[in-house]
Image (cartoon, helix red, strand yellow):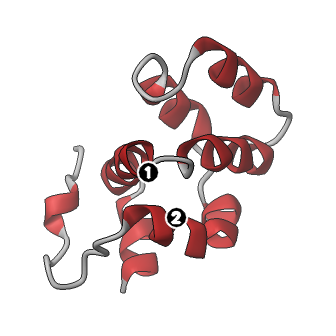
Amino acid sequence: MMLSPTCFSPLSMPTDKQQFLKRNWANLVQKIKCVDDLADEMRGNRLNSEMYSLIMACNTPENKMRKLLEYTITTKTASEHLFTKLCRSQYYIMQDLIS
């Protein structure tokens, strides 16, 4: 079952998703392991083919997450998109980071 970011209390939701991702960079790199799925979902939408290939070429989930964050924190739109994907696919991790 996919959970949506609306499951979070609106009061606890960070307003600046880009800053949230920057502030929680180390925790996200350490805790998010399904990076391939995130990259697949963002391919063609916020990641071009070259970015996607460079992420997939990384040898560990941690390195993949670092590269994904590096590409997505450059714009608010991409940051918001990644934040939403993380809330849906990594609900409990995100809930822990937001609380």
Residue at the spot x=31%, y=75% of the render?
14
Q: Is residue 9 left or right of residue 72?
A: left
Query: In which quadrant of the rendered view does residue 52 lie?
Result: top right
**Residue type at mark 2?**
Leu
Give the numbered dot on residue 31: none
Residue at the spot x=22%, y=52% of the render?
3
Q: Which residue is mark 1?
A: 79
Task: Give the camera-side residue of 1 and 71.
Answer: 71
Q: Which residue is mark 2?
A: 21
Q: CA distance from mark 2 to mark 1?
A: 7 Å
Query: The C terminus is located in which quarter?
Result: bottom left
Q: Is residue 65 left or right of residue 57?
A: left
Query: The N terminus is located in which quarter?
Result: top left
Q: Position of residue 84 (x, y in %)?
A: 32, 50
Query: In which quadrant of the rendered view does residue 81 lie?
Result: top left
Q: Residue furthest top?
A: 49
Q: Residue furthest front?
A: 75
Query: In which quadrant of the rendered view does residue 28 lie?
Result: bottom right
Q: Position of residue 15 (x, y in %)?
A: 28, 72
**Disc 1 crowd, CA 10 A, few/some/many (<14, 14-19, 20+):** many
SS assignment at label 2: helix
Instruction: Say whether marks 2 and 1 touch (CB < 8 Å).
Output: yes
**Residue type at mark 1?**
Ser
Residue at the spot x=56%, y=18% of the render?
48
Q: Is residue 12 left or right of residue 63?
A: left
Sooner in the amino-acid sequence: mark 2 or mark 1:
2
Residue at the spot x=43%, y=42% of the render?
78
Task: Give the camera-side residue of 29 and 15.
Answer: 15
